[in-house]
Amino acid sequence: MRLSRYFLPTLKEPPREAEIVSHRLMLRAGMIRQESAGIYSWLPLGHKVMRKIERIVREEQDRAGFVEMLMPTIQPADLWRASGRYEDYGKEMLRICDRHEREMLYGPTNEEMVTDILRVSVRSYRDLPKLVYHIQWKFRDEVRPRFGVMRGREFLMKDAYSFDVDKEAARRSYNRQFVAYLRTFERLGLKAIPMAAESGPIGGDMSHEFIILAETGESAVYCDRALVDMPVPGADIDYEGDLSPIVEAWTARYAATDDKYDAARFAAEVPAERRVTARGIEVGHIFYFGTKYSEPMGALVQTSDGSQVAGEMGSYGIGVSRLVAAIIEASHDEAGIIWPEAVAPFKVGLINLKSGDAATDKACEDLYGRLAKAGIEVLYDDSEERAGAKFTSMDLIGLPWQLIVGPRGLAAGEVEIKQRASGERVTLTPDAAIAKLAGRGNAGNTGI
Ligand code: 5CA
């Protein structure tokens, strides 16, 4: 992509309204624009990152055996009356009336709708488990939307739902998501720790929040350092096998958010040198709530002995749009964002130090074409800006690699590569630079 054809409205000055670094950087890097409190447009750079996150989330959901579907954003109020949550949800629910005076709402979550979908078509234990998910916009009329997309009113969520015949099977479905979350966050370059949590308005008696440690996190968290260093299951994990040893290993050690924190237990169970007291960002939350919705809504299944029981259910959320900000909180410096390669909007930023100079332009065009041909995503700064301004904005938008091309280097047959994360620079021939960025050759490690 040529910068001249892209839409990247970067800001020079840090915006005054932004209180946390991710919000400031997202606005400065031209990723989002606020349309009204807690509601944002996703500009091309922000949208590209969000799509990459979504893809990783989707791949890991599929791998865990959940099937994708798509439910609407607008739901009829009657569904929520059937579960008893229409009144309970209070002012956080955005209520809408259609032209026929029918009461509707913008969905804050989808337990009722999924239960309704499954109750009419799933009849027997033989049809179970049913494991589904969707990635859809939600609306919660938060009293105090803040921190940009971290706590928005409109936000993108992956929400999955499981429907099983008994508690034991429901536990297996819960474990699938638990393991899928460990893998998802690791692939996103994050260290997320599952913590015992309150289930709040979703309900149920077992729930874990997945929290990443960051100074600007909204909740205080307490955990055993051993969890920070615990290895995450690989891509070859067998989701049809017994996942309980993994879940047990991750839940055996102390980890809790402030609403479940027990100072005496923390002191007794965790040796002083391993006690981590920090702040955290909730990037995912999983719930087992049994028959909370299936019972009042009559979602019954026949068991193997012929009796009718209400389905055992769970729901599993990931804040996809929140993750864009959470990754920035976890990975930035004074100059700007440092994208982990897996979610970077482009892998390489190509900087032309002297646009208008025939030889430099030609060399850049050539490198741009060759990188594109090698399947590498490049953002080519072909603008007339000064070199200093180009460096500043490339550092701000945080692409993992910068390929810097100027007339002096070219005269010596050389270009420069800078790794954004380490600041390390190497001088190479154009051929070697392409090979390094394509992950070939011996010019260094291209993985972050
Ligand atoms: N129905 C359940 C699971 S599907 C549910 O709604 N869970 S939740 O309320 O915990 O939300 C799931 C995830 O969405 C949270 O972990 C968080 O990452 C994200 N999220 C929740 N509220 C917001 C918000 N206001 N802005 C951005 N992301 C949010």
Image: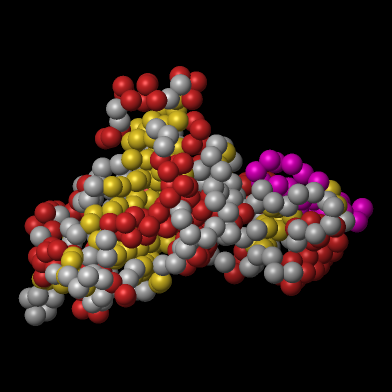
Residue sitting at x 45%, y 28% = 276
Residue sitting at x 14%, y 69% = 298
Using the image as rendered, state which of residue 189 and residue 432 is in the foreground: 189
Using the image as rendered, state which of residue 8 and residue 45 is in the foreground: 45
- The residue at the far front in this view is 305
Residue 53: image x %, image y %? 49, 59
Q: Quadrant of the N terminus?
A: bottom right
Does the magenta-highlighted stretch encompass residue 389? no
Using the image as rendered, state which of residue 438 and residue 410 is in the foreground: 438
Using the image as rendered, state which of residue 430 and residue 60 is in the foreground: 60
- The residue at the far right in this view is 412
Residue sitting at x 91%, y 56% = 413
Corner quadrant of residue 268: top left
Corner quadrant of residue 125: bottom left
Left or right: residue 296 compared with residue 370: left
Left or right: residue 391 compared with residue 201: right
Residue 214: image x %, image y %? 45, 37
Residue sitting at x 86%, y 61% = 431
Residue 62 in view here: yes
Compared with 310, 145 (above or below) is above
Residue 109 in view here: no
Residue 95: image x %, image y %? 15, 64
Left or right: residue 308 compared with residue 364: left
Q: Which residues are magenta?
A: 404-426
